[in-house]
Amino acid sequence: MKNKILIISIVILLIIVAMLLKVSRSMNSNEITLPQGKIDINAVCEGALAYMTFPDAQSSDAFVAECKEGKHPDVIEKYKKDMNLGDAALI
């Protein structure tokens, strides 16, 4: 009877140790990395039209062209902020 209790105790102890090792390894592998990549300037500038209004199509086309030239950096910064890209993303 004592041997049976001893064996059960050892098995339970081994299970607990294995679980602790698994948790320890999973905690080490969950490192946070910043997103990296290249931003599609066409999609960003054209997407900005969704929250803006223009009197005519020529004005909106001019805005998109200026945005692509870099004359509206606020559009890029808003996109980076909305997508949680930080400074790591390139154009």
Image (spheres, helix red, strand yellow):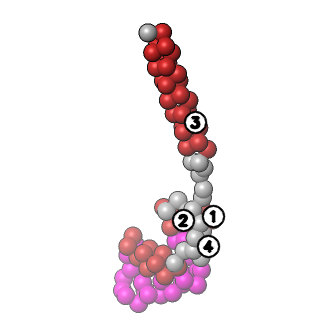
Q: For the N terminus, which image quadrant?
A: top left
Q: Secondary structure at mark 2?
A: helix
From mark 1 to mark 4, how far is it between C-alphas? 8 Å
Dominant secondary-structure state across the stretch colored magenta: helix
In space, the residues marked 2 and 4 are separated at their CA atoms by 10 Å
Q: Write the residue at 57% across / 48% down.
A: 30
Q: Marks 2 and 1: CB-CB under 8 Å?
A: yes
Three-letter residue code for mark 3 = Leu
Where does the image place residue 72, in percent across and percent down from the top left? Answer: 56, 76
> Which residue type carries mark 2?
Lys
Look at the numbered discs 2 and 4 and tell me whether their residues touch, using CB distance below 8 Å. Answer: no
* Range of magenta residues: 52-76
- Residue under pointer 1: 87
Q: Examine the rendering and report whether any part of residue 78 can be seen.
A: no
Q: Is residue 82 left or right of residue 70?
A: left
Amino acid type shown at disc 1: Asp
Which type of secondary structure does the marked residue at label 3 adopt?
Answer: helix
Q: Determine the secondary structure under disc 1.
A: helix
Of badges 2 and 4, the one in the foreground is 4
Could you say which is closer to the camera, residue 75 or residue 6? Answer: 6
Q: Which residue has dot 3 on it?
A: 21
Mark 2 / mark 1, whichever is N-terminal: 2
Task: Write the residue at 60% across / 56% down.
Answer: 33
Between disc 2 and disc 3, whose residue precedes? 3
Measured along the vertical axis of the image, is residue 6 above or below residue 45?
A: above
Residue identified by numbered label 4: 90
Marks 3 and 4: which is nearer the front?
3
What is the spatial separation of the Cα atoms under label 2 and label 3, in whole angstroms? 38 Å
Residue 58 lies within the magenta run: yes
